[in-house]
Amino acid sequence: MSHKLFVMIPLMLMSRKLDGEDPDIIFILRCTYGAVQTLLMLSIAYVFHKVQKAVKSKWMQTSVIYVPIPVPPFPLPAADAKTQYTKTTFSTHLQTQAFSLLKSTGGGICITVALHMYRGMVMGLAMQSAMGPLNLHDNKLAKAILLNQCGEGDETSWMKLRLFDEKYPSELTDEDEVVDDKGEVLTIKQIPMEELICNIWDAGEAADIAPLMKRLTKENVNTKTKEAGWTSIMIIGCLSVKGVDEALVTLKSLGAKPEITDDDGWNALHWAAFHGNSNGAKFLMQEYSGKGLEDAKDKDGKVPLELAKTEKNARVVKIMQETSRKTQ
C-alpha cells in the first residue's frame, strides 16, 4: 500500500495542473486511458480463462483450504488476537478471486467513464491510466498467471505460490481460529470430527489424513458421520495416500471397529473392496480375522468380495481370496 502512495500523490498533483478545458489534452487522455484499459481487460480476460481451465482439475475441486479473513486497515491491538480463517476449496476461492478482479476492474472503468462523461472530470482518466497497471501488478492471482509463476498448473506449483496466504488442514495450529458458516469461531480442537472425516473423503487421492489422525482417541475413533454413517477406518482404509498404512495400525491400536456399518450396510472391508484398495483390504482381513468382515452382507445382500468383482478390482479380488484361504 505504501508504494502506491509514492505514485498516487505525485499523480494527483500533476493531474490538478492539467487543463481540463483543452480539447487536445482531453483527447490525449481519452486515447491513453482507452488503450490502457483495453490492455488491462484483455489481460484480465486471459487470467479469467486460465482460472476457468485450472479449476476443472479434480485436486482443486477437492482440496480444502483455510483462507485468512481480511483485517481492517487499522485494527485495534489485542494481545491474544488469533488469525481467523474461513473454510473453502481451492477451486471455489480461485474463481471468487478471478470474478472479484474482473468485477473491480470493470466497475472502476464504468465509474471513471461516467464521471468524465457527465461531470467532465479528467483527473480520473490520468490517475487510472497509471494506477490501473499498478493495481493489476499488485494482484497476486493476475501476477502469477501473467508471469507464468504457476508453471504447468499442477498441484505442487499452485501450493508453493500461497497466493491467498492459505493454510491446508494439517497446517492449522492452536493459534488459528476457523469461522464456520454460522459465524461461530472454532479452534482446531473444536472442528467437528465429522467435518474432518468428510474433508478427507472429499479430497480423495489428494487427501491429507494428518489432521484427522491427530484428533483421534480411543473415545472418538468410532465416531460416525450423521448423514451417511461413515467412520474413520472406512475412509482411510479405502484410500491410497501417504501415511495410510501407519494410520491403519494406529486406528487398530485405538480400538477402531471395522465391523461397524454405514447407511448402506457397508463395513470397512466393503469400502476397501469397492474402491480397489488392496493394501487396506489385506490389512482388514489379516488384522481383524474372525470379525466376519468378509461374510457381512450389505443392504443389497452383497459381501465385500462381490463388490470387488463387480468393480473389476482384480488385485483386490486376488488378495482377498488368498488371505481368506490363509486365515481358514
Image (cartoon, rainbow, N blue to C red):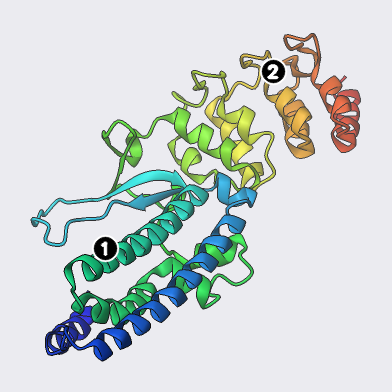
Q: Which residue is mark 2?
A: 266
Q: Residue at x 67, y 34 (%)?
A: 237
Q: Does 230 sit above or below residue 30?
A: above
Q: Measure how far apart labels 2 and 1 are at the Cα level.
A: 59 Å
Q: Does 244 sit above or below residue 129?
A: above
Q: Nearer the viewer, mark 2 or mark 1?
A: 1
Residue 182, given in percent of the width and then of the height, sits at: 30, 30
Of the two numbered discs 2 and 1 on the same chain, state the one appearing first in sequence: 1
Q: Residue at x 91, y 33 (%)?
A: 318
The picture quadrant where one finds residue 76 is bottom left
Tell how many labels.
2
The picture quadrant where one finds residue 310 is top right
Q: Residue 263 versus residue 15: which sits nearer the camera?
A: 15
Residue 299, given in percent of the width and then of the height, sits at: 72, 9
Secondary element at image label 1: helix
Mark 2–mark 1 contact, CB under 8 Å?
no
> Residue 154 shows which numbered tag?
none
Residue 33, given in percent of the width and then of the height, sits at: 34, 79
Q: Residue at x 75, y 33 (%)?
A: 275
Crowdedness near tag 2: few (<14), some (14–19) or many (≥20) residues, C-alpha within 10 Å? many
**Can residue 314 be seen at all in this image of the molecule?**
yes
The quarter of the rendered structure image containing the C terminus is top right
Q: Residue 10 versus residue 58: which sits nearer the camera?
A: 10
Q: Amino acid at mark 2?
A: Trp
Residue 282, given in percent of the width and then of the height, sits at: 78, 33
328 lies left or right of 243: right
Q: Which residue is mark 1?
A: 111
Secondary element at image label 2: loop
32 lies left or right of 145: left
Q: Residue 50 versus residue 244: which sits nearer the camera?
A: 50
Q: Amino acid at mark 1?
A: Ile
